[in-house]
Image (cartoon, rainbow, N blue to C red):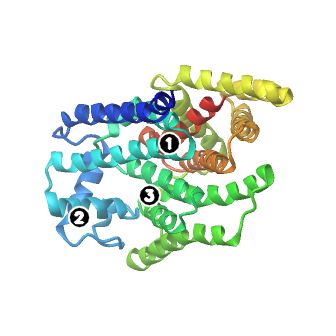
Amino acid sequence: MQNQSHFSNHSLPRILFWLGIASYIVYKLFHLSVSYYWDESWVYAPAVKAMAEGLPSLLPGSIDVSFSRGHPLFLHFMYGWWIKIFGTSHATLHTFSLIITTALVYSIYHIGNQVFKPWVGTMAAFLLIAQSITIAQGAMVLPEVPVALLSLLSIYFFIQEKYWAFALSATCLLLTKESGIALPVSLLVGMATIRVLDADPSNWKRIAWVTIPCLVLTSFFLYQKAVYGWYFYPGHIELQEKSLEVSIKKMDMILDYILFKQDRKLFSIAFILMGLVYLWKNIKWWCIVFLITIPLIFIKHEVTLSISYIGLFFFFLIWIKKSTFRLKQKRWLYYSVYFTFAYIAFSAFNFYTSRYSMTPISILVMVSVPLLWNS
């Protein structure tokens, strides 16, 4: 009986995960030689090839600014060295992208397994693999999958108190794309939240570790100022939103895509309903508040949208607060929710396209599955 229980709770989910990831890899192998598409065709593939022409470097000026567009260069640095070793064919670059996506899916499984339960890791990995955005970007030369991977690893290492690993992964995240700045912001705010909600005292050591990636990114932009005369690419500054009303509507567009597009509507509605049922058993008045505020997302006005977003944010926090998770598990959930909303807010105030949603979708997978499993 004990062996049977061990098989169903540990061995079976592990076997199913490896079968699932193997199936995904085999499916993607047939697409490795396809032509570059969208931004990879005119931005990232030419840029990483240009990086490989010299000695790959993280410093501004390593490639022409028409390729880098002022972005940090860790993505170009990685692909540059890969090209140095394996060449510049479509299949070569797409293979490296597939390796990174495989690492992302495995990280989802590993985090679910280590922080929660083996079945949580397996179900979360399956849910991520099933997303259209994962199938589409899984072998493309784009920064979104590396950003998602490094975001997950950074939060995981932070809650595990592996601070050197956190500093490395978070630094790589910020040097991949500027939107990674949402991570240290969310960790700092998250520490204050957990201290209030769950009596988890923050300390200066953890705060100091969070600042290290920020200092590295600051150094990058100071060096960029010395090379080009500007901190941020002027063309990107022009794309930043100056209107709060427009940013709120962009946030609506982003959340609408993440929650309801590409066949996610039924899952999102079921998830929210299960959360409301769970809260009804514990604190009915909070449930009533969310029943009033969350549906306002369907009224496309900046005031009702703002109320709805705030309601959705606190819906996650209260659900986590009232759950029976251990403190380390709650840390993962709190930090992940803060990071997701901070990342969406950053995207809403800057240029946004749907491929940027890879990161918040990956994070929300590792929030929603544990919450549903616990309920």
Q: Nearer the viewer, mark 3 or mark 2?
A: 2
Amino acid at the residue labelled 2: Trp
Going from the N terminus, do you reach mark 3 or mark 1 first?
1
Which numbered disc flags the more N-terminal residue, 1 or 2? 2
**Residue 291 visible to an observer of this rendering:** yes
Q: Which mark is residue 204?
A: none
Compared with residue 239, is residue 251 higher up or lower down, i.e. above or below? Answer: above
Q: CA distance from mark 1 to mark 2?
A: 32 Å
Residue visible at 42% across and 80% down in the picture: 226
Circle 1 SS class: helix
| Figure quadrant of residue 20 | top left
In-front residue for pair 21/73: 21
Graded by Cα atoms within 10 Å as few (under 14), some (14 to 19) or many (20 or more), the crowding at tag 2 reads some
Residue ID for mark 2: 81
Nearest to viewer (mark 3 / mark 1): 1
* Sequence order check, earlier mark of 3 and 2: 2
Q: Disc 3 to disc 1, how far (Cα)? A: 28 Å
Distance CA(mark 3)–CA(mark 2) = 19 Å
Asked if the residue at tag 2 contacts the one at tag 1, i.e. Cβ–Cβ closer than 8 Å, the answer is no
In the image: residue 197, left or right of residue 333? right
Is residue 239 visible in the rendered structure shown here? Answer: no
Tell me the quarter of the picture where residue 288 sits. top right
In x, y percent, where is residue 165?
A: 48, 65
Q: Which residue is mark 1?
A: 113
Q: Which mark is residue 177?
A: 3
Amino acid beneath label 1: Asn
Q: Is residue 143 above or below residue 53?
A: above
Amino acid type of the residue that numbered disc 3 sits on in the rendered structure: Lys
Identity of the residue drawn at 15% across and 57% down: 86
Q: Position of residue 262 (x, y in %)?
A: 45, 25
Question: For numbered disc 2, what is the local secondary structure?
Answer: helix
